[in-house]
Image (cartoon, rainbow, N blue to C red):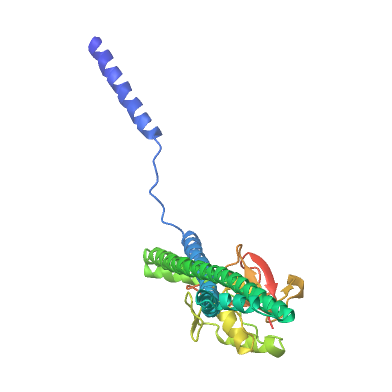
């Protein structure tokens, strides 16, 4: 009897164990990332690299300005040094003449003078001489202080240049890292999947318009930009066969005779701001906050821009990215 009970208990335990196993949740294998997820990651890395590149472009402009200021300060410092040297020579000559007894000789001549008028004239002359000495010493002190100020300004500007140069190196490193990360993400995909990803990236491109209604300088700028559609996107490039976003708009308006800086944020300050409802072909349109991308409006709700390394120079919708505002160059 006890033996039968033991067999029954064993059987029940077995059934319970099987049921328990059946109830344990099975963790599914980690699913491969979808094309949409990978595309989103690559686009994000491309944009982060573009942000770093635009900061690099801004730093280059700052560096050029700083170097120009430094050259002017050094020239001013040299002129001030020459002025100080001239005053120093005058003071030294005045002191030397005093030590040689010129002032005493003048006093003697005044004392022995029998002519009161001559005495007063000589006294006035001696007083004027002393006043001249005081004036020269004051001038020397003033010029010396001015030179010190210029030397300090020169040193400050040189320090700013060193700091900006370090910033350039850091931003370039950031661009390289983000681009390498994007390439690594793409490299992890099979060739067929990678091509599907790039095709998905290009699927957002708009069809080229038959013509763009523009006139004057804007027509020349639009014509240049549209002629580059299909060219490569390369960070920091300004042509002739590869561009970054601000490099393309700079070259396009340069072809129209209008100079623009190689920086999207700097280009945002290059002309009057235009509302979206008043956009005309040739206007520059800006994206993201802080601004890190620029394109050119070509009408019908479309822009031409250097998009990213996966897309190159292409035509896209005006609101295909977070829109900030527009500027009309020229």
In the rendered image, which quarter contains the C terminus?
A: bottom right
The x, y position of residue 279, in whole percent, is 73, 76
Relative to 168, does residue 223 appear above or below in the rendering? below
Residue that sits furthest to the right in the current view = 278
Residue depicted at x 39% and y 50%? 30
Residue depicted at x 68% and y 88%? 217
Residue that sits furthest to the top in the current view = 1
The x, y position of residue 143, in whole percent, is 57, 72
> Of 8 and 308, which appears nearest the observer?
308
Residue depicted at x 29% and y 22%? 11
Q: Is residue 306 visible?
A: no
Relative to 303, does residue 32 appear above or below in the rendering? above
Q: Is residue 210 visible?
A: yes
The x, y position of residue 157, in whole percent, is 51, 69
- Locate residue 288: give its quadrant: bottom right
> Of 129 and 38, which appears nearest the observer?
129
Q: Name the side, left or right, on which 4 lies relative to 192.
A: left
Q: Name the side, left or right, on which 40 lies relative to 295.
A: left
Q: Name the side, left or right, on which 298 lies relative to 18.
A: right
> Of 109 and 211, which appears nearest the observer?
109
> Of 16 and 83, which appears nearest the observer?
83
The x, y position of residue 204, in whole percent, is 57, 71
In the rendered image, which quarter contains the N terminus?
A: top left
Count of all numbered marks drawn on residues in the image? 0
């Amino acid at each position: 009897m006890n033996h039968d009970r033991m067999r029954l208990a064993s059987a029940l335990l077995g059934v319970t164990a099987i049921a328990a196993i059946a109830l344990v949740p099975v963790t599914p294998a980690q699913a491969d990332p979808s094309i949409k997820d990978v595309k989103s990651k690559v686009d994000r890395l491309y944009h982060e690299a573009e942000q770093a590149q635009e900061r690099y472009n801004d730093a280059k402009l700052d560096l050029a300005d700083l170097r120009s200021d430094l050259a002017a300060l050094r020239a001013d410092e040299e002129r001030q040094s020459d002025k100080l040297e001239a005053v120093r020579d005058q003071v030294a000559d005045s002191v030397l003449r005093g030590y040689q007894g010129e002032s005493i000789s003048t006093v003697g001549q005044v004392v022995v003078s029998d002519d009161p008028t001559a005495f007063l004239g000589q006294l006035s002359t001696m007083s004027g001489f002393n006043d001249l000495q005081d004036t020269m010493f004051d001038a020397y002190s003033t010029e010396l202080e001015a030179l010190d100020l210029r030397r300090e300004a020169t040193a400050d500007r040189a320090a700013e240049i060193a700091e900006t140069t370090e910033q350039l190196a850091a931003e370039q490193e950031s661009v390289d890292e983000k681009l390498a990360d994007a390439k690594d993400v793409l490299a992890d995909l099979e060739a067929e999947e990678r091509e599907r990803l790039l095709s998905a990236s290009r699927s957002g491109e708009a069809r080229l318009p038959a013509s763009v209604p523009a006139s004057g300088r804007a027509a020349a700028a639009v014509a240049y930009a549209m002629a580059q559609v299909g060219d490569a996107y390369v960070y920091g490039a300004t042509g002739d066969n590869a561009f970054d976003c601000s490099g393309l708009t700079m070259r396009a308006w340069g072809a129209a005779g209008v100079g623009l800086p190689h920086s999207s944020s700097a280009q945002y300050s290059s002309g009057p701001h235009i509302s979206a409802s008043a956009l005309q072909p040739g206007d520059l349109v800006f994206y993201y906050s802080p601004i890190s991308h620029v394109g050119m409006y070509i009408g019908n709700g479309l822009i031409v821009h250097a998009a990213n390394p996966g897309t190159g120079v292409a035509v896209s919708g005006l609101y295909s990215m977070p829109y900030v505002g527009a500027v009309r160059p020229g």
